[in-house]
Image (tube, rainbow, N blue to C red):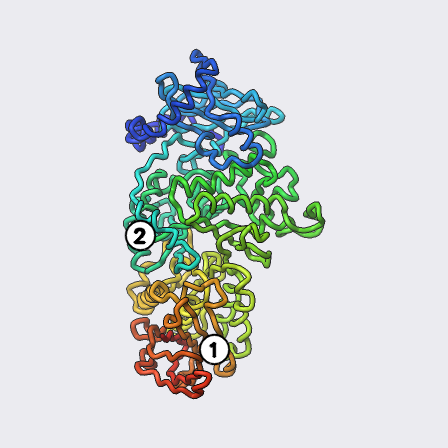
Amino acid sequence: MMRTEKDSTKNEQADQNELQHTNQIVNTEEKTDERSKLRASEQKAYEEKHFVDTSKPVWNYSLLTEEDVKNYQAGTNYRLYEKMGSHSIRVNNLWGMYFCVWAPNATSVSVIGNFNDWKNHEHELYPRWDKSGIWEGFIPNFTLGESYKYYIVGYANKAQDKGDPFANFWEKRPLTASITWDMYYEWKDDDWMKKRKKHNSLEAPWSAYEVHLASWMRPDKNNEESYNTYEQITERLVPYVKEMGFTHVELMPVMEHPFDGSWGYQCTGFFAATSRFGDPQGLMKLIDAFHNEGIGVILDWVPSHFPYDAHGLFMFDGTHTYEYADMRKGFHPDWNSYVFNYKRGEVKSFLISSARYWFDKFHIDGIRVDAVSSMLKLNYSRKHGQWEPNEYGGEGNLEAMAFIKDLNETIFRDFPDVQTIAEEATDWPGISRPTWQNGLGFGMKWMMGWMHDTLDYFKMDPYFRQFHQDKFSFSMIYYYDENFMLPLSHDEVVHGKSPMLYKMPGDTWQKMANLRLMYTYMWTHPGAKLLFMGDEFGQTSEWNYKSELEWHLLQYDPHKKLKDCVADLNKLLRAEPALYENQFSMYGFEWVDLNHRAETVVSFMRKGKNKEDDLLIVLNLTTVVRIDWNVYVNDKEFTKEVFNSDDRKYYGTGDVFNPDIRSELVDKEKKLYKLTLNLPPLGGIVLK
């Protein structure tokens, strides 16, 4: 949006900024004391070598070293947020704002804002002498909390107002200016940070609750313009996730974005938490609160594309700066958006700096990288003639592959106690294998095939499942190819796909029983877990980002008790090492019985590092009660039922359970035991 409303809104916005950000401005010198000392040494060195003309509105000044610029151009400067963008510094004992932006095809770059009545050319930045395309300068007395943009005269004399690609804070949409800000925050999660390596390990329990912050809960569910603040979200969401027993929360993109309907996946602020809920420190407090409850935080991150909004990255300096110029690579037909130019060093530095920023400044425990398939494949959603093969004649985007490898190597080098997770929907090999094994280096990959096969299977009438048992068991054929996370994500409950509950066949009781059974299967299947908000209590409508979850359903037993079932599955996951210690190892799983297709009863074992931790899971996938059902197991007796999805406390029948498991040694030499069990209808049991 062009700033045509500048005269009518500038005073109101200025007052609003002043009201909201007084503490930031007043306490700037105290907050930045440590960093200002470091910067002072850099500034002194600069001033000793260069003449700073203080007679002009913008002083010639730079925080960048020659090495910074060379690495930026080479695609290896991954801390750009420390110097590019806007930074509050002191020059010649005068506080102000240093601005730094890359616009290689520009002929003029000015800072405009409330401070100069949005007048162009009054505060022009200086182009660097090294022809790097970087413009920079220092504006004295420029305070924190000020709205600003860059007025760029670019290629073919095209003039436009652009937000700051490195801004840490933006105006709340529909306004589109960046806001000067300080990122100081006193973290209180030292204990978490010291021990999170164990918590985020691939040998730790992983159960992630996927959340869209705006629509999880609103002040007014009928008003899509109403948002809880980060503080209010903290008060409500943190204890809920703690109560439910999830090990992690995954937040759909919280980076600034102009259109709510994109759910955050069309981002304009790659270094800014959205202002819909408050300032960046509000998000930091939310993450801090999760950490202090022992819950990890994963952020969705989108390096695959960006929207064409006028204030964003598209045609930033009048030509294709951040996106590929060849629209066979640069335009995304599915999302009407633009693809980053992964070959360009400055773009690569920008993106990896963005990922690193969230780990560095926000203490996150992982990123889930969106739409990796679209990055890797030149022919993604393109027909013959709409794409060009790479130099070897293949479909892979070699530049994107190199970028992803560098991304993962950088994150795991600098933050070895976190995870990176790929949302990748094809059979591309080695997604979660180390780069030194010719993999892409992610820690985990979403198991999209498992999700589709599982939902297809459970949608069937239980009678017909006997004819499709291979669909149920197929996941273990390729499971060990990657480190998989099992997702039941937001994508499965929108666009006419129906809520999770209504995917299930049968009457209300059977739908609930099927859902509990599917969740039991999911939680006992090897791999990390991810469940979208609302699925834990059986939403009866599709997810609507304009409203909130159907919290009123919890007054009804079927929904409340389904929620209790999911909470107990999370407790089971945390309590039983067999469910997580070997979750990515072939030693952690064994089929026990797949030979009863007609009855549609399946059993398997989950194995921990210690034999005494092993679990036996038996799933009865039809409505027929099985009394005195025999299961044969080697080496070990199972004497205790530790979970039953048909328990009355979960809205089950409560009539079919195993207080005393009958066990008989039928082959002493082979140590083969026959267990005689009672199997509930549409039920899963876990034995120890």
In the rendered image, the quadrant that contains the C terminus is bottom left
Labelled pair 1, 2 in contact (Cβ < 8 Å):
no
Residue 238 tag number? 2
189 relative position to 598: left or right: left
Q: Could you say which is closer to the camera, residue 59 or residue 547?
A: 59
Amino acid type, mark 2: Val
Q: Of helix, strand and loop, which one carries label 2?
A: helix
Q: Please tell me which residue is depicted at 51% across the width and 54% down the height of the picture.
A: 423
Residue at 59 percent of width and 59 percent of height: 427
The quarter of the displayed image where residue 635 is located: bottom left
Viewer can see residue 559? no
Task: Place residue 42 in its image quadrant.
Answer: top left
Q: Earlier in the sequence, mark 1 or mark 2?
A: 2
What mark, if any, has residue 327 been given in the picture? none
Q: Which residue is mark 1?
A: 592
**Residue 445: x and y, percent?**
51, 56
Judging from the image, what secondary structure is the residue with disc 1 in?
strand
Dot 1 amino acid type: Val
Instruction: Judge left or right: residue 628 versus residue 100.
Output: left
Given residues 237 and 203, the one toward you in this image is: 203
Image point (55%, 57%), residue name: 425
